[in-house]
Amino acid sequence: MAEPGFASLLSGGGWPAALGWMAAPLLALLVDRWLGEPPAPLHPVVWMGRALQRVGDRLAPQIPVAQDFKRFWLAALAWCALAAIVLIVSLAVQQLAWRLLPPAVAGLAVGVLLKPLLAWRMLRDEVLAVEVALGQSLPAGRAQLARLVSRDVSALSAVQVRESAVESLAENLNDSVVAPLFWFALLGLPGAALYRFANTADAMWGYPGMRGGRYWQWAGKWAARADDVLSWVPARITAALVALVAGGVRLRALVRQARKTPSPNSGWPMAAMALALGVRLGKPGVYTLHGHGRRAGPLDVRRAARIGQAVVVACVPLMALLQGLVWWMEGKFA
């Protein structure tokens, strides 16, 4: 049986198959809520991280080099090779489900397989745990925040810890939920898997300087740019959803604030969250979002989590609509 698409679904399994496929994101989110993350030995993102770690240790030098085009191209080729493996494996798994299972069930099976490629429950719990830890002590709050961010947290105040927690929730709302679902809607399981690979590669390789005793300025440049490209549309969708579910966020203000961060994408969901909460967010010495906002208080982390939950819920019909549009275009131009 052919790979699922609008034409093949209607000719093969009919509307039950199409509805089962469109329900895959909802099932993935329900599994995420009920069960959380699978064990590390079974987690595909963990596998990606281990592969990237092994390859990266051989690519990134320990001594800074002003211009290292050789490392850049070797890392680019390594990224493409690993991405090809991710695409081939995920496509094979998707095809296997479609061939072995009834069409109406295949989409639901893919929904279960989609779950490890998104992570809302873990993100929400980790961010809320920052406020709980702050209630114990500032060092405890910093330690909990360090599980979420790569920045140095040792000198952050309680307010800055909260700001960083809210920023992490907003940014990862895109990286861990909206973007994987967006690429699933467009390309199925391979699309979601490729995005999570690119995002993981950026988190591990995409540094402008030293990390882990290695110099990533050139070895990580391709990974950083690839993630920028794949996150461009989803980041703006995430910001729009935050603004929509929260209400009262002006588009002009959102655009102006989003451009203040060095990243072309992360500023969008973070700026939307800052405006939605009415708080100031920022990274000391780098950027400040909604500078006229108030200081983040103990309730703002929980408010951010509630907005994030509303965005996750809103994603389900939006991505189903996008899937339907993709299938309609496939049928129209087939």
Image (cartoon, rainbow, N blue to C red):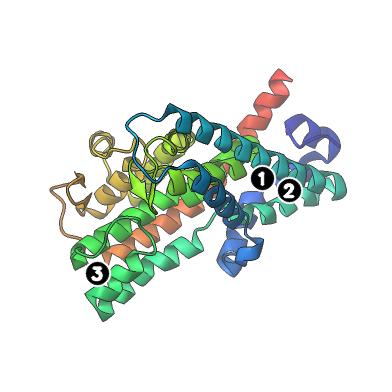
Q: Please identify the quarter of the rendering in which residue 322 is found.
A: top right
Q: Which residue is mark 3?
A: 298
Q: Quadrant of residue 126?
A: bottom left
Left or right of 54 in this view: 334: right
The answer to whether residue 156 shows anywhere in this view is: yes
Q: Which residue is mark 2?
A: 107
Amino acid type assigned to the residue bearing label 2 in the image: Gly
Near mark 3 (Cα within 10 A), the count class, few <14, some 14-19 or many ≥20, is: some
x and y, in percent, of residue 219 in the image: 44, 37
Q: CB atoms at circles 1 and 2 under 8 Å apart?
A: yes
User: Of tags 1 and 2, which is closer to the observer?
Assistant: 2
Q: Relative to 305, say whether 201 is above or below.
A: above
Nearer to the camera, 222 or 66: 66
227 with respect to 150 (left or right): right
The quadrant of the rendering that contains the C terminus is: top right
The amino acid type of the residue labelled 1 equals Met
User: Of callouts 1 and 3, which one flags the residue occurring earlier in the amino acid sequence?
Assistant: 1
Give the percent coordinates (x, y) of residue 228. 43, 35
The answer to which of marks 1 and 2 sits earlier in the sequence is 1
Asked which secondary structure carries label 1, the reply is helix
Name the amino acid type tagged 3.
Pro
| Residue 120 horizontal/vertical position (percent) | 49, 59
* Residue topped by disc 1: 22
Q: Nearer the viewer, residue 165 or 83?
A: 83
